[in-house]
Amino acid sequence: MRKYFVWIGLLASTPLVLTAQSTPIAITGTLVTPQEIVPNGTVLFQNGKILAAGAQVQLPPGTSTVRTDGIIAPGLIDLHNHLTWNVFPRWKPIQEFGNRYDWQQKPVYNMLMNEPHYELVGEGLECAMERYAEVRAISEGETSVMGGMYSACAQGLARNLDYDPELGSGLGKIIYNIFPLTMSESDVTQAVAALNAKPRGSLLIHVAEGSPRDASAAREFSELEGRGLLKPGVSIIHGVALTPQNFSSMAKAGVGFIWSPRSNIELYGDTANVAAAKAAQLLMALAPDWSPTGSDGLLGELNYAAVWSQSQFPPPLTDRDLVMMATSNAASLVGLQEYIGSLAANHAADLIVIRDTGKTHSKDAYWSLTHATPEDVELVMIGGVATYGDPQLMRHLSASSLETLKVCGFEKAISFATEKQTQPSFAETESTLDQALRQMGRRLAPLSECGN
């Protein structure tokens, strides 16, 4: 049984109001900043911003304190996803492909994925699809996401970084492009202008997605270079076919890298040479791609990446490396390192509390984060607002009405209080999507595949 101790100077049943709250809130546990582990640490926040975090935090009079036995980490940041596609269950191709253009032309992909997706969009369900995908992401510890297809669907549940940062004025523009080699000259000009602006913008692009043995995938890097897009602020997604020399060129140009190992291996039988990328001192992030062939979310991708790394000799990435790739590194790649990605003063109070499973395995907090499963998510806070977690803790931290969910057999609670417009219940959203998918011979994906 999980225990939480809530000290609020009032009756224990009184909820804490965490929207523009005047009362400072402190949450205690093992902190992952993520650069270091702080046992018996405290995160103090108020009005959506972290005031202080560390081992010796002075609490102002009247602070409400929530004591947990868990691991407190920054909210996970997903820089590579295709949100509306995450309504589909896993797609398990019976072959490995040379590059992404191969599987996109297969009749089975068109029948199981492409046609149903755009049929749902044609029925006006795109915002329901994105809402469902955001709840899936939040249940995996994500507080910031990329890859929404429709700006009108940004409702304020998770942070939609590609079109609705909501972190303050004067931030650089973030551009997310799936097919950069087909960008028009006008689009390239706009992207370069964003990269040259102050503050600098970001361009996240899919490049060299395919087997290292596939000539067309390998050729994309030189084509990208020929378009003048090896510039600071650019991050390459996938890069399975990139060579050590390519990674060195990227590092010298200030280009980042976003790695999605599970989807790479399921589609192409291989993934990027992250050992070479690390040797080149490339700034790297980790992201799940999409749930049909990748992971359900970043917790799942952390687990997959950790197991994959340990299977290599020598292991190219540590658990600490991976946690940074899902938090502070990701924030840096899109120029938001002063706003999200760390438990530090003046950052947004985006944080997660994860059950500490490492103690029983003589492991540290980094290991617990890279081996956590959805049922281990005790709390997700976005902008200081309790958004998702264990029902007991959510009832203490949220004054809004809660909906209950079943995730891998465990009951969780979620608040939709931050959504900008009135929405149907989440159960209604699920039912609407599932009924529409049934008409196409498909079913709505569960919130978590629970280890599959």
Image (spheres, rainbow, N blue to C red):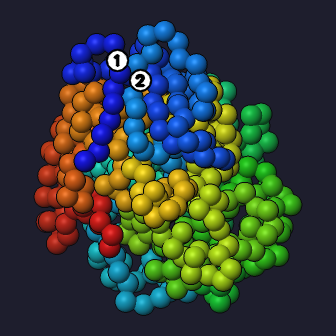
Residue located at (74% from left, 34% from top):
199
For marks 2 and 1, the one nearer the N-term is 1
**Does residue 131 appear in this view?**
no
Q: Amino acid at mark 2?
A: Thr
Residue toward you, 250 or 174: 250
Q: Callout 2 environment at 10 Å: few (<14), some (14 to 19), or many (20+)? A: many
Q: Is residue 222 left or right of residue 298?
A: right
Marks 1 and 2: in contact by CB < 8 Å? yes
Residue located at (14% from left, 65% from top):
438
The quadrant of the picture occupied by the C terminus is bottom left
Q: Callout 1 environment at 10 Å: few (<14), some (14 to 19), or many (20+)? A: some
Q: Amino acid at mark 1?
A: Ile
On the image, the x and y values in percent for residue 16 come to 32, 20
Q: Is residue 248 left or right of residue 293?
A: right
* Mark 2 residue element: strand
Residue located at (22% from left, 53% from top):
410
* Mark 1 residue element: loop
Residue located at (24% from left, 60% from top):
408
Residue bearing mark 2: 65
- In the rendered view, tell whether residue 430 sits above or below residue 353: below
**Does residue 282 appear in this view?**
yes
Residue bearing mark 1: 8
Residue toward you, 312 or 334: 312
On the image, the x and y values in percent for residue 158 come to 42, 40
On the image, the x and y values in percent for residue 417 come to 30, 28
Residue toward you, 435 or 299: 299
Q: CA distance from mark 2 to mark 1?
A: 6 Å
Q: Which mark is residue 451?
A: none
Q: Is residue 47 left or right of residue 15?
A: right
On the image, the x and y values in percent for residue 251 come to 81, 61
